[in-house]
Image: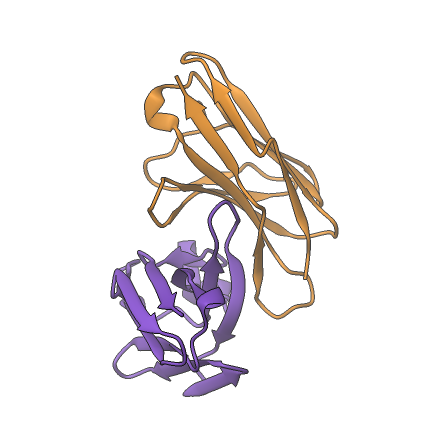
Amino acid sequence: SAVISQKPSRDICQRGTSLTIQCQVDSQVTMMFWYRQQPGQSLTLIATANQGSEATYESGFVIDKFPISRPNLTFSTLTVSNMSPEDSSIYLCSAQNPGQGYGYTFGSGTRLTVV
Amino acid sequence: QQQVKQSPQSLIVQKGGISIINCAYENTAFDYFPWYQQFPGKGPALLIAIRPDVSEKKEGRFTISFNKSAKQFSLHIMDSQPGDSATYFCAASCVGSPNAGGTSYGKLTFGQGTILTVHP
C-alpha cells in the first residue's frame, strides 16, 4: 500500500493566522482527499484534489477557507485560513492506492488547536 | 442519499468473544465497502473491504457480511483480543463507474464510528 507522510503532526496556532499542512505520498496517485475529524467524531470529506485541476469541495467547505494545492502526483497541501477555535480538529489526507484495487490509505493526521 | 449509518456507538466485549458492528447505506451506487480501524493519534487503517458481488469476505479473524437487498453490511471480529480495542469505521464508495457514481465517485462516506473495548 501507498505510504503517506503528513506534517506537521500537530500545531497550536493563534486565531486569525493560517496553517499549511503537507501530504507526501511515496507513489504516484491520481486522487487525493482531505478530511476533517473532530475529536471523537467520524471523518468528514473536505475536498478532492486531482493533479492538474481545481480541487472539488464538499458542501460546507469553501476554497477561500481551505485552499488546496496539488502540484504533482505525489504531493498536496491544505491550508486552513483565518483560523478560529472552531477549526480545532484533526486534518487527514488520503490517497487511493495505485494498483491495489480500491483501497485508500490515510496519513497519520495533523492535530490542530486554535487558541 | 449519501449517509452511512453505523451501530452501535460503543461496544464492550470480553476477550475471546465475537464483536459485531453493523452499517446501513442508502446510495445504491455504492459498490465498495471498507472497514477501517483507528487507534488514538493515528490515521484510519484499512482492515478489510468487500465489493457487492460477494456476500461474505473473511481475512483471518475479520469477516464482512454483505446484504445487498437490505443495503446492510457488518463486521465480525472473532476471538476478540484486547489489542483489537480501537475505533472502527465502516465506509462506502462508488469506484466502479464514474457515470453511476456521479459526484460520489471515488469518495469515501464514513459511518459514525464504533468504539470497541475488549476486556482481558
Q: Quadrant of residue B82?
A: bottom left
Q: Examine the rendering and report whether any part of residue B15 can be seen.
A: yes
Indicate the position of residue B7 as horizontal and vertical percent values: 25, 66
Viewport quadrant of the N terminus of chain B: bottom left
Indicate the position of residue A19 as horizontal and vertical percent values: 53, 22
Q: Please name whichever residue, B84 or A57, is drawn nearer the observer in this view of the structure.
A: B84
Instruction: Tell how many labels.
Output: 0
> In the rendered image of this protein, does residue B90 appear above or below residue A78?
below
Compared across the picture, whether B39 is left or right of B25 comes to: right
- Coloration mode: by chain
Chain painted in purple in the figure: B
> In the rendered image of this protein, does residue A68 appear above or below residue B7?
above
> In the rendered image of this protein, does residue B86 appear above or below residue B16?
above
Chain painted in orange in the figure: A
Q: Residue at x 74, y 49 (%)?
A: A26
Q: Quadrant of residue A20?
A: top right
Compared across the picture, whether A7 is left or right of B34 comes to: right
Q: Quadrant of residue A64?
A: top left
Indicate the position of residue B68 as horizontal and vertical percent values: 33, 82
Extreme residue in the front direction: B120
Q: Residue at x 28, y 84 (%)?
A: B69
Q: Residue at x 36, y 41 (%)?
A: A39
Indicate the position of residue B112 as horizontal and vertical percent values: 31, 56
Q: Please name whichever residue, A72 or B11, is drawn nearer the observer in this view of the structure.
A: B11
Q: Examine the rendering and report whether any part of residue B96 can be seen.
A: no
> In the rendered image of this protein, does residue A108 appear above or below residue B86?
above
Viewport quadrant of the C terminus of chain B: bottom left
